Image (cartoon, helix red, strand yellow):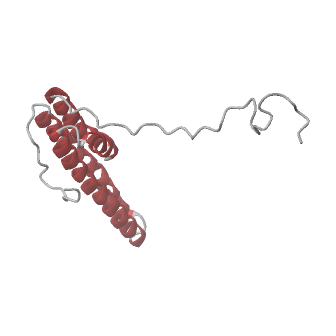
Amino acid sequence: MSNFSGPGSDDPNQGQRPPQPPYQPAAPGPSAPLSEAADRQWASLAHLGGILMFAPALVLWLMFKDRGPLTNVEAKEALNFQITLLIGYVGVNIVSTIIGFLTFGIGGVLGGLGWVLYIVGVVFSVLGYLQAKDGNHYRYPFALRLIS
């Protein structure tokens, strides 16, 4: 027998709210498709982002690939080109390091080819930007098509 003798004394949770299920946020709905102008803008910025290496193209492709057809194609093309340049940077650095060790530093001058790759990347990224901002597709002259 309980010491409490009020109404509802058999309720073990008297004065408390019943337990609530944990909060479940609603699943996000699909994003709205991009307008033609916004599609061209993001597609061109994916190319121009190549100046900063592959991260801008990757982020733009992941964010907008389902929202705009031009952005999907152009960001993927820019990302493939930037990955190709990244492979080139790694290759140049490995070769110049090995040759630098073998020639006691003289072959390390080949490390300057990394800057040549960067300048080539900037030039082609700007060309891609100029084409994509007008709504045209741009295909880089050399790129491994790793993402299709």
What percent of the width, then of the height, locates residue 53?
A: 32, 45
Query: The N terminus is located in which quarter?
Result: top right
At horizontal 28% and vertical 43% (from top left) the residue drawn is 57
At horizontal 26% and vertical 54% (from top left) the residue drawn is 85
Direction right: furthest residue: 3
Give the total number of marks visible in the rendering: 0
At horizontal 20% and vertical 31% (from top left) the residue drawn is 34
Query: The C terminus is located in which quarter?
Result: bottom left
What percent of the width, then of the height, locates residue 101?
A: 42, 69
Residue 41 lies, with reference to residue 49, above or below; the image says above
Q: Is 138 or 97 nearer to us in this picture?
A: 138
Q: Is 59 or 126 nearer to us in this picture?
A: 59
At horizontal 21% and vertical 48% (from top left) the residue drawn is 76
Residue 48 lies, with reference to residue 147, above or below; the image says above
What percent of the width, then of the height, locates residue 23?
A: 54, 37
Q: Quadrant of residue 103?
A: bottom left
Answer left or right for 90 relative to 84.
Answer: right
Q: Is 122 or 147 nearer to us in this picture?
A: 147
Q: Is 86 or 63 nearer to us in this picture?
A: 63
Residue 67 lies, with reference to residue 79, above or below; the image says above
